[in-house]
Image (spheres, helix red, strand yellow):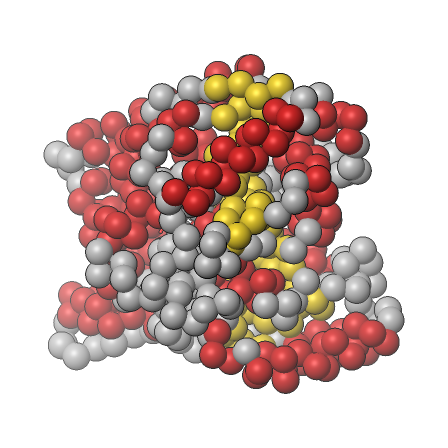
Amino acid sequence: MSRKIEERIKAFPAALKSHQELNAVITDTSAQALERASAGRANGVLSEHLLAIKDNLNLQAYPTSCASRTLEGYVSPYTATPVQRLLDAGAAIVAKTNLDEFAMGSSTEYSCFGPARHPQNQELVPGGSSGGSAVVVAANLVDAALGSDTGGSVRQPAAFCGVYGLKPTYGRISRYGLVAFASSFDQVGVFARTTELTAKVFEVIAGHDPQDSTCAAEPIDTFTYDEERTRSLTIGIAPEYEHADIDQEIRERYLDLTQFLKSEDFSVTDISLPHTDYGIAAYYILTTAEASSNLARYDGIRYGRRDLEGDDLEALYMDTRSHGFGPEVQRRIMLGTYVLSAGYVDRYYNRAQRVRRLIQQDFLSAFDNVDILITPTAPTLPFPIGTKVDDPITMYLSDVFTVPMSLAGVPSMNIPVGRARDGLPIGLQLTAAHFGEETIFQLSRFIEQRYSI
Ligand code: GLN
């Protein structure tokens, strides 16, 4: 354990203060990090690094707010598995970061603590829902951060803020201690400023955990950059994405990177993902259904704050949930309850499950022919705060390129590939077959090193 890291931990509160306007952090946890470091308890492969975690991951003895009034006063009695693995690897966890309430959103505006702001322009959103984690990495306050990605919440804010953002394969990382949003989609993900550190943090937190029965026992390949192997990868590009409604500068950058890889003699093929268009609809039916069930526990009796204005049980539920949850969470609970209700379950939920299978099939067929897919991450550049909050459908369309991978459960990562004319970052997304994170890191490293941005 070096002096240097102790100094950095000590300097963190002041650094945070000087970036206060970004509203990226909910709780400063650097006191605990400093204690661990000073006591010589921070040893391991991450002992030189400052980390932050999204505030829907438990860190014992600190609040986990999920940016919701519902969890006011809640203090975590235990530490989430991926967070514990960071600590065991010596990481200094200095902050819990701002997010959309219960990770529902694409802009970090739906937070009871107010919106997080883009590090380059405070009038803009940083993306979401893990916006705070993307911001602290982009603003150099920490080296890496954890987020959670249900339909794009790591990849899209990473694209908006110009950093790497990995959503691993579903089941790669334990969800024990991650507050559930949509359990068959949720994955903990990693933000960092380099491919290498993204891979390192991923390797630390990934792997089987008996506390989560959906967590896979699949071995984790250690990433060592191998240019020769990387050059032998077959790359797929999807015309469905190229022709979609997308910002012109993002499209140009997508085509430019494709040209570059061709000029480097990569084999690049068109791949069809024919069910892409149905992704958003299926995603918002299935995740709201799961959310309505997961959030039923915050009823003022079993979990969460309690409000009582009336004098019966019904009123207690009503008051508690109406005051505790913000508008977006309430909207999703209502939608989810509706799509699961008798009479509608076949028309919506069961049909969406079938679409999910077709989308999975699209990816499986694609990966019969290519090793890795390149697509845009988001259809737009960072947008002004306030422009989409009252228009949920437009907000949902921010996820059009990220939800298909979440429906399929495949790993996918945003890589920064340059800037638009006004200086805002542009990101593209690399996607591999299940458990193919290491393949993603290889191509990411190649592009990081060779593609001038
Ligand atoms: N923006 C998406 C949503 O609102 C994704 C959220 C997430 O990945 N947690 O559902």
* Residue at x-position 71% and y-position 21%: 232
Residue 249 picture location, percent across and down: 43, 45
Q: Is residue 42 above or below residue 177?
A: below
- Mark yes or no: residue 286 visible: no
Determine which quarter of the picture holds residue 125: bottom left
User: Which residue of the protein is positioned furthest toward the right in this rendering?
Assistant: 2
Q: Is residue 153 above or below residue 277?
A: below
User: Which residue of the protein is positioned furthest toward the front in this rendering?
Assistant: 421
- Mark yes or no: residue 143 visible: yes
* Residue at x-position 43% and y-position 38%: 251
* Residue at x-position 69% and y-position 55%: 85
Q: Is residue 367 above or below residue 425?
A: above
Front-most of residues 399 and 345: 399
Pick the quarter of the image with the N terminus: bottom right
Q: Is residue 65 left or right of residue 297?
A: right
Residue 176 picture location, percent across and down: 55, 52
Front-most of residues 64 and 411: 411
